[in-house]
Image: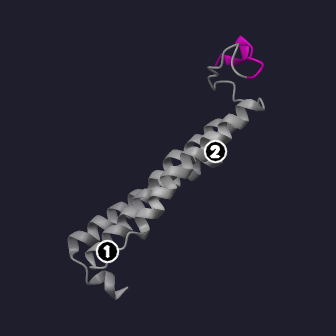
Amino acid sequence: MDALNQLPEWSQWLAAFFILLGAIFAFIGSLGLAILPDFFTRLHAPTKNTTIGIGGIVIASILITSVQGAINLNELLIAIFLFLTAPISAHIMAKAALHTELKMFNRTKDFRQEGDSYKHILPNKKDMEP
């Protein structure tokens, strides 16, 4: 902990800002996962917010190690891997949920049309009303 106190004050403030920003985004993503009503909205919250949250924490880690003089790009590799895998896995899960006709919240918009690549049952008009 003493090594962090020896950093310049501007870098401590900047690192604290990115850590706090990352923690807030990660918390919002986790909260969305817990309280949103259906799979599709639950999938959206952690995919976007938690990715940004982890990105903020990784930026703080890169900042701290670079100010200490030990430039290490391991954190950058973690960020690249995270930013590539999170959207791809969310896309695959959403396509699987659409393909299996997973039940949607009644106000979730369904933009599929007849004649798409697989058969599906479109919701009734009354189910889409608020």
Q: In the rendered structure, does residue 32 fall within the stretch colored magenta?
A: no
As displayed, is residue 65 above or below residue 16?
A: below
Magenta: main secondary structure: loop
The residue shown at (45%, 52%) is 52
From the viewer's perspective, is 54 left or right of 15?
A: right
Q: What residue would you read off at disc 1? A: 71
Q: Amino acid at mark 2?
A: Ile
Image location (x, y in percent) of residue 35: 64, 44
Between 72 and 24, the residue placed more toward the observer is 72
Give the residue drawn at x 28%, y 72%. Answer: 12
Q: Tell me the quadrant of the picture where the N terminus can be found.
A: bottom left
Element marked by disc 1: loop
Q: Closer to the N terminus: mark 1 or mark 2? A: 2
Q: Residues within 10 Å of mark 2 (few under 14, many from 20)?
A: few
Residue picked out by circle 2: 35
- Whether 42 is drawn above or below 127: the answer is below
Q: Is residue 34 shown to the viewer in this render?
A: yes
The picture places residue 91, in percent across and down from the top left corner, at 61, 39
Q: Is residue 66 left or right of residue 75?
A: left
Q: Position of residue 93 (x, y in %)?
A: 67, 41
Q: Where does the magenta region start and end? A: 118-130
Q: Secondary structure at mark 2?
A: helix
Camera-side residue of 113 and 125: 113
Quadrant hosting residue 117: top right
Q: Are marks 1 and 2 in contact (CB under 8 Å)?
A: no
- Does any portion of residue 103 appear in the rendered image? no
Residue 26 pos. (x, y %): 50, 55
Q: Quadrant of residue 108?
A: top right
Q: In this rendering, would 101 be left or right of 16?
A: right
Quadrant of the drawing holding the C terminus: top right
What colouring method underlies this structural image? one colour
